[in-house]
Amino acid sequence: MARIEFLRHMTLVSLIVLILCTTASPIFASKNCDFPAIFNFGASNSDTGGLDAAFAALSLPYGETYFHRSTGRFSDGRIIIDFIGGVFATLIPKEDYFFKALYTFDVGQNDLTAGFFGNVTIQQVKATVPDIINNFIENIKSIYNLGARSFWIHNAGPIGCLPVILANFPSAAKDSYGCAKQYNEVSQYFNLKLKEALAQLRGNHPLATITYVDIYSPKYSLFQNPKKYGEPTKYDPTFMVVYVWISIGSD
């Protein structure tokens, strides 16, 4: 079995373990959390410091604090999990950890976002969703066949609320909260198909515990009820994206 770097995602581990220990879900609610390890498969939403494939290599100021140069990561240098991972760099997990671990997945948003910038229509991007889902499910099956049994799978967030979408597609029709409506509809369609596919996967793999995690709703609620989460800050999404791209091209 291929070696997996143990406890690489400790920041994510802490958050998920807390959720699993306190959630009211009948699947996970218990006094004890018995996962000896958590292995994450995902992009920058679930792996802090990871680089979104939809963007080019990042230049300064990213990386300046620790490396004093560009590192191609969404951080100013090294992050907590780098140091924790270094401590356990030579530790190979016990074999039963692979069977008892929780496997978390956060995929889809990059696939959809990259499609929007691929000189195709929204409908053409939407048409790729079944293939994206099928490939994702096949990967889950592969990991299941290696012994994994507990899966925690995020859906896609409201892509139409991302500054990169709002800035690059300013003519897109907006909903009442300022998000690009059609782009969010693609996210919703992706999530619907993902949920259906996971339901079928559960039926075909009764020994697996597969939890579908709704990330879309709480993220969208930030736009629906901003005052609920603190004093709203006025921002210009165009400025945010322009800053990123100027930074990227400043080398």
Image: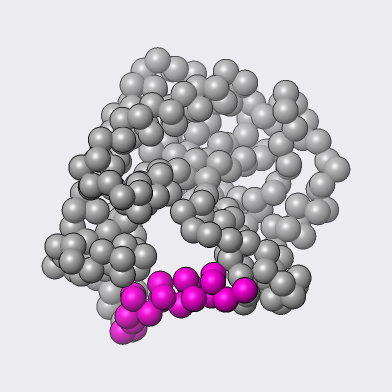
Relative height, residue 243 to residue 183 (above, below) = below
* Front one among 176 and 151: 176
* Front one among 139 and 25: 139
User: In this rendering, does residue 119 appear at all?
Assistant: yes
* Front one among 67 and 147: 67
Q: Residue at x 23, y 47 (%)?
A: 121
Q: How many marks?
A: 0
Relative height, residue 226 to residue 109 (above, below) = below
User: In this rendering, does residue 18 appear at all?
Assistant: no
* Front one among 90 and 73: 73
The C terminus, quarter of image: bottom right
Q: Quadrant of the rendered structure where residue 194 is?
A: top left
Q: Residue furthest top?
A: 204
Where residue 20 appears, as percent x and y from the top left, is: 50, 46
Where residue 131 appears, as percent x and y from the top left, is: 35, 29
Q: Quadrant of the rendered structure where residue 34 is?
A: top right
Lateral position of residue 99 relative to residue 122, left or right: right
Q: Which residues are magenta?
A: 233-251
The N terminus, quarter of image: top right
Magenta includes 42? no
Q: Residue at x 56, y 36 (%)?
A: 103
Magenta highlight: main SS: helix
Relative height, residue 225 to residue 188 (above, below) = below
Q: Residue at x 61, y 21 (%)?
A: 147
Q: Residue at x 24, y 53 (%)?
A: 183
Lateral position of residue 141 relative to residue 216, left or right: right
